Every structure is written in structure tokens, then in C-alpha cells.
Image (cartoon, helix red, strand yellow):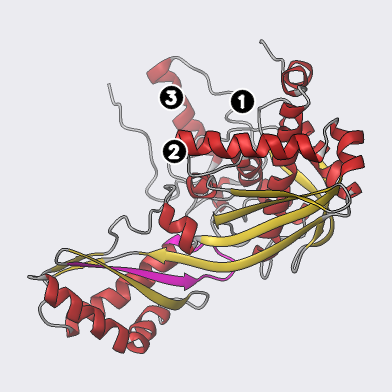
Amino acid sequence: MNTKIPRSLENDYTQEMAAIRRQFLFEQTGQVARNVGSYSFDPAILPGNIENFIGVAQVPIGLAGPLLVNGEYAKGRFYIPLATTEGTLVASYNRGMKLLEAAGGITTTISDDAMQRAPVFIFPSARQAREFGKWVTANFEHIKKEADKTTHSGHLRDIEQYTASRLLFLRFNYTTGDAAGQNMVSKATKSACDWINSVYPGIEHYFLESNFATDKKSSYVNMLHTRGKRVTAEAIIPGYLLEAITHTDPDQLLQARQVINLGSFLAGAHSNGAHSVNGITALFIATGQDVATIAEASAELIYAEPRPGNNYYYSVTIPSLIVATYGGGTGLPTQRECLEIMGCYGKDGVRKFAEIVAATVLCGELSLGTAVVSEEWVSSHERFGRNRR
């Protein structure tokens, strides 16, 4: 029996080839992928997005909002498409948006923007590695020229250096326009490193990636130095609104925040937040983002304090938010529609989208946190999240 998945060398992205592979799947497993085979777009648009295409995974999309954002790029009210199968999630984010709209909205700030590739160069001795570092600093403009010639959108911003033994780790930081840029910076860094390797004597070997960029992994270096966008969402909520909408008050929330900070410390967690990945994942699936970068984005930093007049200040900083409004999966039909709902698709949309993501996270954190404090968390899930089929 032939167990090789069928492919067409002439044109593999057709409805016919997808049907042939689903038939092959039936012959191998006895399972009919009928619903998987129901979709609304032409497979011809998929090269570069998928291989061995058989159909689609249909994830329900719910709508939350309006989300009121007072950002530098996102200004006004937005409706947020969230793709999830977790009952209560959309309702919870919607409640947080209601609270923060009543409070006057969410202020968002992007403080850094960088995508990395981190090659490592190996030398016979630590002293030679140190001297190479001096050469890299002196020749940055030449290195930048070699990197930047490979892309119109990407630009090498700077190179960080970290020594260990006879190795020098270089962390290349790029801006990447409206693309997430992982592939873009790989190509640019390879061009630069190949040039370095050809002109600098004494290099034993180099690896294009040393795992120091920590691609799709949570790490302290990305929390401190940023990977993707570093964005903060903050708001001041009057105490009377907390009492009216969430049945809590600033004093209760501050005590809960102190407990959560201690619990996060004891657990050795990279984050002192509750569930940022819920909202980010749902937004990422809806809009065609690289969902695996949730690993980086999960490291949220929460800060809260009481303010005069019985007000409560609350903020979330996401130090490694990797988003795109162009390229990758963002141009697929439903994903593009979801970005267009928020006015974020295409050129000059990525910073606006990053601010919307951070503002959405803030709403979810406040909603869940207040539900726990008011002891409405379990009852909410029982009401909205029960599905025993």
C-alpha cells in the first residue's frame, strides 16, 4: 500500500488535489474529513502558507466591543473579533471593554520595536572573541549595509554583544515595517554574517542562530530588551464603576494584586498576569498571526496602584508582542476581513494593531481579576462555558 501523501509537481494548490488528499486520508484512516473540506476560498492563494493542503480548521469567531482606545495609532472605538472555542472568553473581554469605556478608555504606548536574529561566532580563544567584538562595533555601518540590501522593509538598528568562553553572541536588532519579520531578518543576518566570515580572519565557525533570540520561547532577555513590539496599555478606573460593574472596589483589587504578585514569584513565573494569552491567541487566530509567538507574548507585566479620589490605576506591559498586518497569514480571506474590521490591514497598520491587542489584554485581565475577587468566576463559566457534548 502506498502511504506517501499525494502531491502534484505541476499545481499542488487546487480543490482537486485537496480532495485527492482527503480521499487518501480516508483510505489510510477510515475517517471522512467532510467538514475540513468545506471552505470559501481558492486554494491557489495558499503557496507560502501551507503544504499538503486538505482543508480548513473552522474556529468560531465572536465579537467583543466597543473597545475605546486613546492610542498614538489606534484612536477611537473598535470591535474586536476573537476566534476561540472557550465559552465565557468573549463575554469576559466584552465586560472589561464595557468597564473601561465607561472609565474613559485605555491609553496605549509603544516604547520599543525590534525583531532579532542572534548568530554566534566561535574563535580559538576568549581574547580573540573579545577583539572580534571591537571590530564589529567599529564596522557596524558595513555590516548594516550588507544586511539592509536584502530587504526594502527591514533595517538593522543595532547589534548587541554577549561573550561566553570563546564565543561571541551577536543579537541583531531590526525594524521590519508591517511584517512580523522573522524570515526577513534571517535572510538579512545571513547576508551580513557571510560577509563578516569572508573578511574577518580567525573565525572557526559561526551559526546563524544560537537560540539567543529565543524565537517562540519566553525569556528574560526578551522581557528586558524587547522582541517585536513593547507596548503598554493603562487606565484609571473610578471606584464607583468598579463597584457598579464588577462588584469590587480598589482596596480589594489592590490586596488581590499583592497576593497574585507573591504567587507568581513563588511559582517562578515569567509573568504576574492572569491570562493575557487568552485574548492574544483569539486575536491571533482570527487575524492570521504566527500563533506560536504566543510563547513570547505570554510574558506580561502588570502594575496597579490606588490613585486619589478612590480611583484605581491598572496597566499591562507586553514586552514581546510579535504582530503583522502584512504578509504571512494576514492576507488570507477571513484573516484579512478580521484585520479590516479593526482598520488594521496592510501598510502602516501594525502599530495600530499592536495597541489594540494590548488594550484588549488589559480588558481581559481586569475582567478576570475582578471576577475572581467578587467570586463570580466559577458561576460565569457555569453560565457561559458549559458544553458537555
The quarter of the picture where residue 386 lies is top right
Residue at 27%, 74% (x, y): give it: 193
Q: Position of residue 342 (x, y in %)?
A: 77, 55
Could you tell me which secondary element the residue under label 2 belongs to? loop
Question: Are circles 1 and 2 on residues that touch, CB within 8 Å?
Answer: no
Decide: few, some or many residues near mark 3? Use Cα within 10 Å; few <14, some 14-19, many ≥20: some
Residue at 79%, 17% (x, y): give it: 383
The amino acid beneath tag 2 is: Gly
131 over 180 or under it: above or below: below
Alpha-carbon distance for marks 1 and 3?
14 Å
Alpha-carbon distance for marks 2 and 3?
44 Å
Q: Which residue is mark 1?
A: 35
Magenta segment:
167-182
The amino acid beneath tag 3 is: Leu
> Of all residues shown, which one is farthest toward the top?
388
Q: Which residue is mark 3?
A: 25
Residue 204 is left or right of residue 195, and the answer is left
The residue closer to the viewer here, 192 or 260, is 260
Residue 193 is left or right of residue 180, and the answer is left
Q: Position of residue 284 (x, y in %)?
A: 61, 46
Decide: few, some or many residues near mark 1? Use Cα within 10 Å; few <14, some 14-19, many ≥20: few
In which quadrant is the C terminus drawn? top right
Nearer to us of marks 1 and 2 is 2
Q: Earlier in the sequence, mark 2 or mark 3?
A: 3
Q: Which residue is mark 2?
A: 268
The residue closer to the viewer here, 114 or 178, is 114
